[in-house]
Image (cartoon, rainbow, N blue to C red):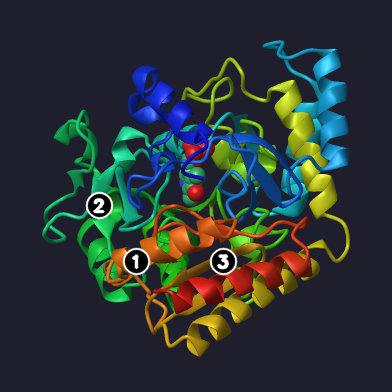
Amino acid sequence: MTHTTDHNQVLFDRAKRVIPGGVNSPVRAFKAVGGTPRFVQRAQGPCFWDANGRRYLDYIGSWGPMILGHGHPAVVRAVQEAVLEGFSFGAPTEREVQLAEEILRLMPSMDMVRLVSSGTEAAMSAIRLARGATGRSMLIKFEGCYHGHADALLVKAGSGLATFGNATSAGVPPEVVKHTLVLEYNNVAQLEEAFGLYGKEIACLMIEPIAGNMNFVRASVPFVKRCRELCTEHGALLVFDEVMNGFRVALGGAQSVYAAQLTGFEPDMTVLGKVIGGGMPLAAFGARRAVMEQLAPLGAVYQAGTLSGNPVATACGLATLHEISKPGFFDDLSRKTRSLVAGLKAAAAAEGVPFSADSEGGMFGFFLLAELPSNYPQVMKSDGQRFNQLFHGLLERGVYIAPALYEAGFVSAAHTDEDIAATVAAAREAFRSM
Ligand SMILES: *Cc1c(COP(=O)(O)O)cnc(C)c1O
């Protein structure tokens, strides 16, 4: 390797001259784990090839969207056909209606959806709509949950409930985050206290039900139950950010997983992205009719987009939803994901490495901790140094996982049992050398 040119490094050096950090989204730069980001040349099924022509088993799948694996023939065909009909019109199309109907069929908590182009845009618009519909300003989010990079959501907890959050990014004025209350995930007492203090001012509570932006942390059933009860009691909207969970942890999203344990449970609003675009820029937010009718052109809450409901993206999303709706799809995906998690646990145990892991549908997470964490401070007790050793140990063996310990992993339908077995074997070697 040392005598040949590393084309990833050549591209990275070139990229750094023209793109800040060489990347168009920070985590891609490998800053947390060190080393050279892999520049992807092409991908097929469960794999991609980097600029050196080296093959990797991909457990990121574009951070979730590629649930069918790369280059699924039915999806490729749908996109090719759509491209021939036109790239973008800025006028309505039948395919947008079909996709909206399909989303609503799979997630009956919503009566209407609006299509947008990114999860960030969907979450930002959902908050504007919640504020407009309730006539209130305040919003609750939880430490460790990510809802895209809208200004009002780039907030970390303040020093107490009475002190509101601080911006986590430069360029976000304190005035913009002064209505955002950041609470600890899975902490019922703090949630009750917050509603006790501010109940009448809270427009919405936004939550990642299975938080994939702190690797993999489930909101406990009692916690979700209290979120639902307190929102109802105080007239606030419960917003499920299912950008990652939706069509990934189950066909009906995380809301169907919680409804199976809490009779009649549904959120008031749902934010979607990632899988619904099948790898194309597409996202959505939806709710009951009375809330959605507050949106322009019907109502007073403004929201718009030049490329919203893009005809190629909707073709890709529709074909993807069609494939994942087939009988047995999620049973098979869940089984493979569970077998990966069980294999990783056994490999870690055999090598004496403290390890915990969990999965739902095609989403998984693991921690170099003996116990699964239940909130962000616990996640952050993970040993970053050891995670980096594991990350590079896997990468050297052709297995690509998220280059940061607070990110979830994704299995696709294209991963075979042999791929899973090869991954577990690679992990065992990596654990041994740690
Ligand atoms: C990825 C993600 C977003 C942001 O979506 P983008 O398309 O990257 O803007 C929002 N919320 C959650 C839960 C996500 O995982």
Element marked by disc 3 = strand
Q: CA distance from mark 3 to mark 2?
A: 28 Å
First-in-chain label (3 vs 2): 2
Type of the residue with mark 3: Phe
Percent position of residue 157, x then y = 20, 55
Q: Where is mark 2, residue-wise?
A: 181
Percent position of residue 72, x then y = 82, 43
Element marked by disc 1 = loop
Give above or below for 383 relative to 296.
below
Percent position of residue 272, x then y = 59, 44
The front one of 404 and 271 is: 404
Type of the residue with mark 2: Leu
- Point out the frontmost of discs 3 and 2: 3
First-in-chain label (1 vs 3): 1
Give above or below for 387 relative to 111.
below
Residue 179 visible to an observer of this rendering:
yes
Percent position of residue 252, x then y = 70, 59
- Point out the frontmost of discs 1 and 2: 1
Residue at 55 percent of width and 82 percent of height = 347
Give above or below for 37 relative to 311.
below
Q: CA distance from mark 1 to mark 3?
A: 19 Å
Q: Where is mark 1, residue-wise?
A: 185
